Image (cartoon, coloured by chain):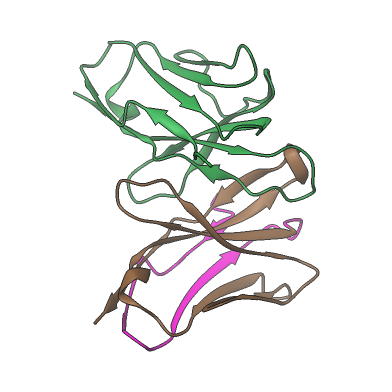
Chain colours: A brown, B green
Amino acid sequence: DQQVKQNSPSLSVQEGRISILNCDYTNSMFDYFLWYKKYPAEGPTFLISISSIKDKNEDGRFTVFLNKSAKHLSLHIVPSQPGDSAVYFCAALHGSGNTGKLIFGQGTTLQVKP
Amino acid sequence: EAGVVQSPRYKIIEKKQPVAFWCNPISGHNTLYWYLQNLGQGPELLIRYENEEAVDDSQLPKDRFSAERLKGVDSTLKIQPAELGDSAVYLCASSPGGGRFPTQYFGPGTRLTVL
């Protein structure tokens, strides 16, 4: 049972345009969400997170939106740059603090074309 | 600050052979995680340590997998014997103690190929 789903395996956008990566979850008990970025042959790198008490969190070119009623979150990258080309994983924290574990989606491969 | 260190980066073995992976977390991080990542999938937790105690090993296949973190710092994950289906990337992560939502920091992973 996949509790965190990223239904788009890949996304291609033009440099300078907006990239929107989507993520759906099924467990309403999740209250913290994270996005990780992964380059080939490297481990995932933390990008941005959001608590369920918020509906938006912004950090530079990256914004995460959370719609709890729809159990949906999205990552917006504006403007997209070729260096953003990577695999993006959505993750939900099951539990809290150091007792929690991350449940990851399958990942979306983003390609930003110059 | 040094990140999470893992070795080896790549390992190729024949089935039924043993294999071990090593992880050194970020200095001062009390919590250490081992994840398994299959091709085209997100990482899945195998085991979580708080200092030297394994506090969640429910996803670890204990018939062939074992892990230890004897002094609460570095950790070793072992598979014996390895099977073809164990081919995957094994990721180690660490996070600082305390706080409700500590961020997990990942190492580069060990890519295991079982022939």
Image coordinates of residue A11 in percent, x first then y, are 34, 74
Q: Is residue A35 visible?
A: yes
Residue situated in front as seen by the camera: B2 or B80? B2
In the image, residue A27 lies in the stretch drawn in magenta: yes
x then y, percent, for residue B21: 40, 21
Quadrant containing the C terminus of chain A is bottom left
Picture residue at 42% right of the left edge, 46% below the top:
A43
**Residue B85: image location, x then y, percent:** 32, 29
Classify residue A106 as left or right of residue B85.
right
Boundaries of the magenta span: A1-30
Residue at 63% across, 13% down: B71
The image quarter in which residue B81 lies? top left
Quarter of image, res A19 = bottom left
Residue shown at the point (53%, 20%) measured from the top left: B75
Q: Is residue A62 above or below residue A9?
A: below
Q: Is residue B44 covered in magenta?
A: no
- In the foreground, A59 or A77: A59
Q: Position of residue B4 (x, y in %)?
A: 49, 36
Query: Is residue B112 shown above or below A27?
Result: above
